[in-house]
Amino acid sequence: MTVESTNEELRELTLLEQIESDPDVNQSTLARQLGVAVGTVNWHIKRLIAKGAVKVSRAERKKLRYIITPEGLALRARLAVDYVERSFSVYRRTRQRVKDHLLKVKQAGFDRVRIVGSGDVADICKLTCIEQGVSIVNDKTVPALVLDGYKIKLEGME
């Protein structure tokens, strides 16, 4: 599965959740919530309508109301499960990469590392270090786990 198709599925899931919570929501509000252009929201909604996941009715002269169909509820559930499964997969792979790096760190005689980066991946690194008995310090003389998105490089092991 490509990153683009994953992003599209996440947008569809978010759209379905937003529409379910507020059927009178408009496309500009949805675009703001998703951080995308109104045209992108329009494209996704048209796809959801074509899939039979959403129906549109006219609430007022210029106002539309979106209704999630039973097919849409099933799609939302599937997309949510897929998202959770992908997230756990990323979590497990990240933990394993960190464990592999920490094994090299310990074999080189270190019991401390620096973590260069922040966010969810850094949090996974910190938890894995604690679990593996490796201290996290801000000392440039120890090896570093350098984060670049989901990539984790081990530096300072010369």
Image (cartoon, rainbow, N blue to C red):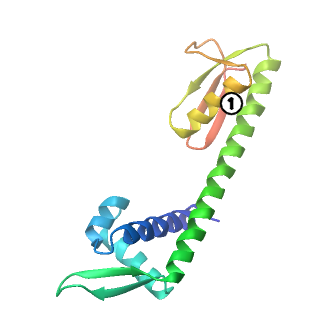
On screen, residue 138 above or below 30: above
Residue 149, horizontal then vertical, whole percent: 55, 43
Q: Is residue 158 left or right of residue 145?
A: right
Badge 1 marks a residue whose secondary structure is helix
Of 48 and 115, the residue lying toward us: 48
Badge 1 crowding class, 10 Å Cα cut-off, few under 14, some 14 to 19, many 20 or more, is some
Pick the residue in front: 60 or 142.
60
Quarter assignment of residue 147 = top right
Residue 140 as seen in the image, left or right of residue 104: left
Residue 87 vertical position relative to residue 152 in the rendered view, above or below: below
- In the rendered structure, which amino acid carries the disc numbered 1? Thr
Quarter of the image with the N terminus is bottom right
In the picture, residue 98 is in which quadrant? top right
Q: Residue at x 57, y 61 (%)?
A: 3
User: Whole-percent x and y of residue 58?
Assistant: 26, 88
Residue 3 vs residue 78, the one in the foreground: 78
Going 49% across and 87% down the picture, which residue do you hit?
52
The residue singled out by tag 1 in the image is 128
Is 24 placed left or right of 73 in the picture? Answer: left
